[in-house]
Image (cartoon, grey):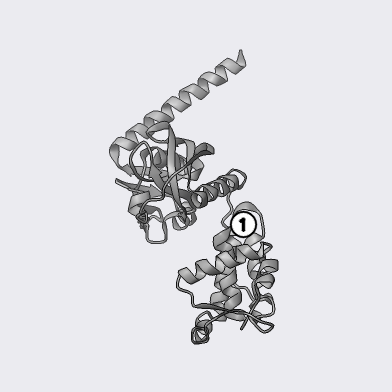
Amino acid sequence: MKIDRMIGILSVLLQKDTVTAPYLAEQFEVSRRTINRDIEDLCRAGIPIVTMQGAKGGISIMENYKIERTLLTNREMQDILAGLRSLDSINGTSRYGQLMEKLLAGSSDFMTGNQSVLIDLSSWYKDSLAPKIELIRDGIERGVLLEFRYYSPKGTAERSIEPYYLIFRWSSWYVWGWCIDRKDFRLFKLNRMDKLALSGETFCKRAVPLPDLNTEQIFPGGIQVKAVFEPECRWRLVEEFGADCFEEQPDGRLLFQADYTNKENLMTWLMTFQDKMVLLEPKEIRIELSDMLERMLKRNRSADRESDL
């Protein structure tokens, strides 16, 4: 990817006094002409790069700019590597880790096994997410419309968008883009996308506002939940909502209060606690949950009778 290569070139230039275009071409496995275009792009981005002809010539960053090399400390470079390796965890490759190791081998001691931060962004959906992420990145870089089927609480719809950003937030991946149908920017969750494809139709990139990633925007809430849990449920409440989400009662039970985002998800979540929970509020959801459990019980009893026939 071009942006990866340009970051790599800049990293090399910050570490070495002078390098040649053939050296960079060999390191990044591209043509010398491609390297020259990348250098021009870096110059346009405001990086003061100079080139000199002759036997001792080459490509370098202006001397008064090299003072800033110390801005990245050993620990900060470890964090950068951890972040790049976390991207490898998405699709099972080692592309980003190899990039940094290739650039930084021998330049500092942070590549000698001193890493203390390991990040794994993979998930149960790794096999389906990796192709989507690569396809979306391709659409973003080439400016090609994406088409897909989208599943939401409001139903299923065919969508077409101009993709602009891939976002990882709250353990999930999203794409931020201009929805052709809605005539507005929308955030789409990758796990809800199916039959994703590049349409082949290009678009002119527009001014793009950054998405609002506040928790309230992604998880709008609105359902005030109050429930009592048995003491053995403490670990789950702490893991999922934090240690301040409940008050321990004199009998040891846990009075839980939180703002939940979706009624169906709430009911599903509550049922995972089986008989270790009593829902106090909202009353209407307690009634609906009880009715649903009774219907489930009747259906299963009916299935038992039919299996005995």
Q: In this view, does 32 lie above or below 72?
A: above
Element marked by disc 1: helix
In this rendered view, identify the residue nearer to me: 274 or 85.
85
Which residue corresponds to mark 1?
89
Residue 218 screen position, x and y as percent: 37, 50
Q: In which quarter of the image is the C terminus?
A: top right
Instruction: Classify 10 Å Cα crowding around label 1: few (below 14), some (14-19), many (20 and above).
Output: some
In this rendered view, identify the residue nearer to me: 180 or 300.
180
In this rendered view, identify the residue nearer to me: 108 or 127.
108
Q: In this view, does 251 lie above or below 186?
A: below
Q: In which quarter of the image is the N terminus?
A: bottom right
Number of numbered labels in the structure image = 1
In this rendered view, identify the residue nearer to me: 72 or 306.
72
Residue 197 screen position, x and y as percent: 54, 38
> Seen in the image, is 179 located left or right of residue 202?
left
Q: Can the viewer see residue 221 in this picture?
A: yes
Q: Which residue is drawn at 67% across and 60% down?
A: 94
Residue 80 screen position, x and y as percent: 55, 70
Q: Residue at x 40, y 29 (%)?
A: 292
Residue found farthest to the front: 54
Residue 8 screen position, x and y as percent: 59, 69
Q: Which residue is drawn at 36% across and 39% down?
A: 263
Q: Which amino acid does label 1 sit on?
A: Ser
